[in-house]
Amino acid sequence: MNRVAHYLQEHVAGEVMTGNDARAYFSTDDSIFTLVPNVIVYPKNENDVRKTARFIWQLAERGRAIPLTARGSGTDLTGAAIGSGIMLVYPAHLNQVKFFDTKASEITVEAGINFGKLQQLLVSYNRVIPSAPASLEYSTLGGAVANNAASRRSFKYGSIRNYVRGLRVVLSNGEVIETQRISKRELNRKLGLSTFEGEVYRSIDTLIEENRSLVEKSVLSISKNATGYDIADIQHKDGSFDLTPLFVGSQGTLGLITEVTLGTELYNEPTSLVTAYFDSVDDLQAAVIELRGLSEAPSAIELVDENLLNTVSAENANYLKEIISAPYPKFVLLVEFDDMSEHDRRKGSKKAAKVLGKYSQSVILENDPEKQKLIWKVRDASALLSGHAIGQTNPLPLIDDGVVPLDKLSSFLSGIYEQFKREHLQVAVWGHAGDGNLHVQPHLDLSQVGDRQKAFRMLEDFTTQMRQLGGSTSGRYNEGRLRGPYLPKLYPDDVYQLFIKVKKIFDPYNILNPGVKISVSSDEVKPLLRSKYSLEHIYDHLPLS
């Protein structure tokens, strides 16, 4: 590997490191895994990414395949930001705004830009990306695109896929392509190219043409989904074609994203907030379904359960003081409206309050911004769990991102409680009720063989539950190494084989983030488990979710 490092040092403009301390630092992300890279590269520009990919491709052609992994700030919860070969670390240099079209309200930036700084810039122009994840202050845009991240407001605005207008991507052989939605005529021109890009377009076009029924089967009947590859959105009925949806959510397994062009929304700070307390899971589900049918769409429908509130109160008695009092309701639902018009906000919130009044024990309608901030602390309480150790155990991002159809929300919650009871574990649930997307992190000690076994048993049971409920194991965090082994249980085999073919088309030598998402087994990832879990990469921040 020293020869590889020496070659890269001579040919790239950015820095190349092989020191043990640097390699150790980049051996973890925010997942439960550890994997030490051999070489760290800080690409100065896109050309460095291209040269590195081309070099690795040439080695692979001669039978020596070295993994190539792109990394932002290492906040990935699934092990997709670690790799054993060459690590391309973007934030040091690839962090610039390239172009801001204020008329079209589109912005083009390099993938390593900090999402929070990008959002600050946009707000100064009265624009915003509403799908920015809770981790935006300590994560990169490229990482969010690679995972198809979403925000609390995904109920109204969807995931970041909805805002990506185009990409610049370095393919596995080092070619650089630009993606955007193109017409049928432009597609025909792409199909005629003699380059690897042309080969990719021809292969994907043929794959879709020959497997239209399978492409349709790849779409799960849920509000959002970050698993698999989005092959269904490539070709539209008008014949237009766009590879962008494939790269969004692909976790660096199909290409190396260097630039992103994003659409934006008008920024509007004032909101109306309705809070309701529930003592019945069935009433909660009924209320959420009716809220989803309102003509005035809420921007967020968020949930926390009594277990989370009890845990936080025991840890910090003052945190919830003057906001909500014990004994806590079984569920707290927060419904937000962010319409530009105050009239529309108040109209929507009043309708929501009327719906909630039919099913809940208490309803609070609040328009004062300062009081709203206090109420939102109830939802933000989930952040305190990330550092809440119980003895030698830590909360693990394990079965942490399931999504089900809304009419299965009650069954989802009941199943979580049953699973944790079966494993003799404390439970706390929070998440995006309007999307049927919930988070839960079991407390386990990874230094103990029994808990390591329990972790994978819970993953198996969780995947089975999601399949039975017609859901997905991930709405916003993706599969990575964590849930990749269980993807074949989530989709029919013929659909999963379609995903494998997509990967093969873009990465025939399997050099782009191998062991992530596709063709990965639990036997491969079990040895990668950390012996001690921590979030040391982001403890400068409160890790929100």
Image (spheres, rainbow, N blue to C red):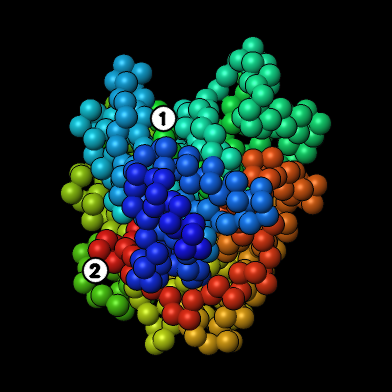
Vertical placement of 214 versus 380: above or below?
above
Q: Amino acid at mark 2?
A: Tyr
Question: The residue tagged with tag 1: helix, strand or loop?
Answer: strand
Q: Looking at the figure, which quarter contains the C terminus?
A: bottom left
User: Residue 386 placed where, x, y %?
Assistant: 37, 69
**Local crowd at mark 2 within 10 Å, few (<14), some, or many (≥20)?**
some
**Horizontal and vertical percent position of residue 32:** 49, 70
Q: Residue at x 41, y 38 (%)?
A: 46
Marking on residue 319 = 2
The amino acid pointed to by label 1 is Thr
Q: Nearer the viewer, residue 343 or 190?
A: 190
Precedes in sequence: disc 2 or disc 1: 1
Residue 278 screen position, x and y as percent: 45, 60
Label 2 – label 1 distance at C-alpha:
40 Å
- Whether residue 72 is visible to the viewer of this picture, yes or no, is no
Residue 104 shows in this picture: yes
Where is residue 465? Give x, y as percent. 67, 63
Q: Which sits in the foreground, 475 or 186?
A: 186
| Residue shown at 34% from the left, 47% from the top | 14
- Relative to residue 179, is residue 158 depicted above or below? below
The residue located at (24%, 35%) in the rendering is 121
Question: Outermost residue toward the top?
Answer: 185
Q: Which mark is residue 389?
A: none
According to the picture, the residue beneath numbered tag 1 turns out to be: 261
